[in-house]
Image: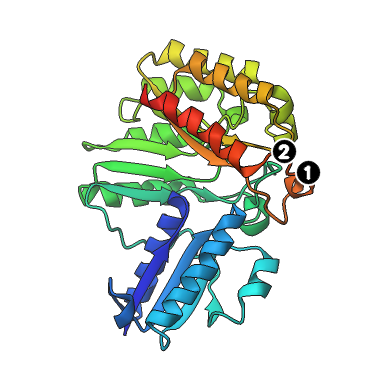
């Protein structure tokens, strides 16, 4: 029996796919890169944006044309209403794989270690709390054991994953210190972070641990306080700027990347310019820009989507052009 996995979305989805692959191979399935030869096809996707649902429809349609006999399974961040729409197009839904499942790692250099899943933040545009549920953290001893095993296998990067790693229970800083003490030649990375949970104590720990890569992904989403409030981000632009100052105080060479959403409901041209001002002030090493699209099931879905697509795309192009300079 042969299987094929199609993965969309973030690193957490990629990690989930590695765990699915491990479980299938224990059941004597073999991986194939050719959809035509697969007996089982799994689509693992993140439906944070409505456009992802449309992609899922398109992908399911194409797969059925290429390989109509294959068993088609869907997994990932899926709302109940989307399950209802898709249930007649697939064979079954696969629940999230247990965090403790050992993955089948594809990369030779780096390995993902999910330390938690779910989210308690309820940003107004995001469906993660509704699809993955509330935050659940793994035991620190299990994470450390997995890291030691991977380091013995000569992986050079250990990437800790979570929707919000800073809120890892019981203490993310202590976990980083414990991992930093493991003997070996490797680097520790982690994502993603929420500004409201990036404390000075954690910054000092990252600064002093030599094995932690001095790269921090800290999504800001907007440079305007009113938009941040509508997004339910629980911090202000001023607090974010102060946080960056503290990071650079203790780690001057740190690369800071971010996420930004353009065209959020009611975002005026002036509010967008506030985001541009923030970008210039911070000097991010990388920016991942998303065009807002209404997502059924979120609080923001009830907001008026009052910015035309052309304007949203134009704002995205402006930010991307800044990165090229």
Evaluate if marks 2 and 1 touch, with contact meaning CB atoms under 8 Å apart. yes
Q: Is residue 184 above or below residue 324?
A: below
Q: Is residue 132 above or below residue 56?
A: above
Q: Position of residue 212 (x, y in %)?
A: 35, 30
Q: Quadrant of residue 47?
A: bottom right
What residue sits 41% from the left and 31% below the top?
Answer: 177
Q: Which mark is residue 47?
A: none
- Colouring: rainbow
What residue sits 70% from the left and 31% below the top?
Answer: 267
Per the model, the C-alpha gap separating discs 2 and 1 is 6 Å
Q: Quadrant of residue 31?
A: bottom left
Few, some or many residues within 10 Å of mark 2 (<14, 14–19, 20+): many
Q: Secondary structure at mark 1?
A: loop
What residue sits 65% from the left and 67% below the top?
Answer: 82
Mark sitting earlier along the chain (2/1) = 2
Asked whether 299 or 106 is in front, the reply is 299
Asked whether 31 or 113 is in front, the reply is 31
Q: Is residue 28 visible?
A: no
Q: Secondary structure at mark 2?
A: loop
Q: Which residue is mark 1?
A: 303
Which residue lies most toward the front here?
A: 310
Q: Is residue 265 visible?
A: yes
Q: Which residue is mark 2?
A: 265
Q: Position of residue 163 (x, y in %)?
A: 54, 45
The C terminus - image quarter:
top left
Asked whether 294 or 177 is in front, the reply is 294
């Amino acid at each position: 029996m042969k299987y094929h996995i199609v993965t969309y979305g973030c690193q957490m989805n990629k990690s989930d796919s590695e765990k699915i692959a491990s479980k299938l191979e224990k059941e004597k399935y073999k991986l194939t890169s050719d959809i035509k030869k697969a007996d089982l096809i799994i689509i693992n996707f993140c439906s944070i944006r409505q456009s992802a649902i449309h992609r899922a429809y398109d992908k399911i349609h194409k797969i059925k044309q290429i390989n109509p006999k294959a068993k088609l399974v869907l997994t990932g961040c899926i709302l109940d209403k989307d399950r209802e729409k898709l249930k007649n197009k697939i064979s079954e839904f696969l629940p999230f794989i247990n965090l403790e499942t050992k993955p089948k790692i594809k990369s030779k250099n780096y390995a993902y270690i999910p330390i938690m899943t779910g989210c308690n933040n309820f940003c107004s545009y995001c469906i993660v709390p509704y699809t993955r549920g509330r935050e659940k953290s793994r035991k620190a001893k299990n994470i450390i054991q997995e890291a030691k095993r991977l380091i013995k296998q000569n992986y050079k990067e250990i990437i800790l994953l979570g929707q919000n790693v800073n809120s890892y229970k019981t203490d993310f800083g202590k976990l980083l210190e414990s991992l930093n003490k493991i003997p070996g030649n490797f680097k520790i990375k982690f994502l993603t972070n929420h500004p409201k949970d990036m404390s000075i104590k954690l910054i000092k720990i990252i600064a002093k641990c030599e094995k932690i890569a001095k790269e921090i992904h800290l999504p800001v989403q907007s440079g305007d306080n009113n938009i941040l409030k509508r997004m339910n981000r629980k911090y202000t632009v001023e607090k974010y700027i102060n946080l960056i100052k503290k990071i650079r105080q203790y780690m001057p060479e740190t690369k800071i990347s971010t996420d930004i959403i353009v065209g959020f409901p009611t975002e005026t041209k002036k509010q967008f310019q506030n985001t541009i001002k923030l970008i210039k002030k911070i000097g991010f090493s990388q920016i991942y820009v998303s065009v807002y699209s209404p997502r059924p099931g979120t609080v923001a879905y009830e907001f008026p989507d009052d910015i035309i697509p052309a304007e949203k795309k134009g704002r995205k192009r402006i930010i991307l052009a800044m990165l090229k300079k």
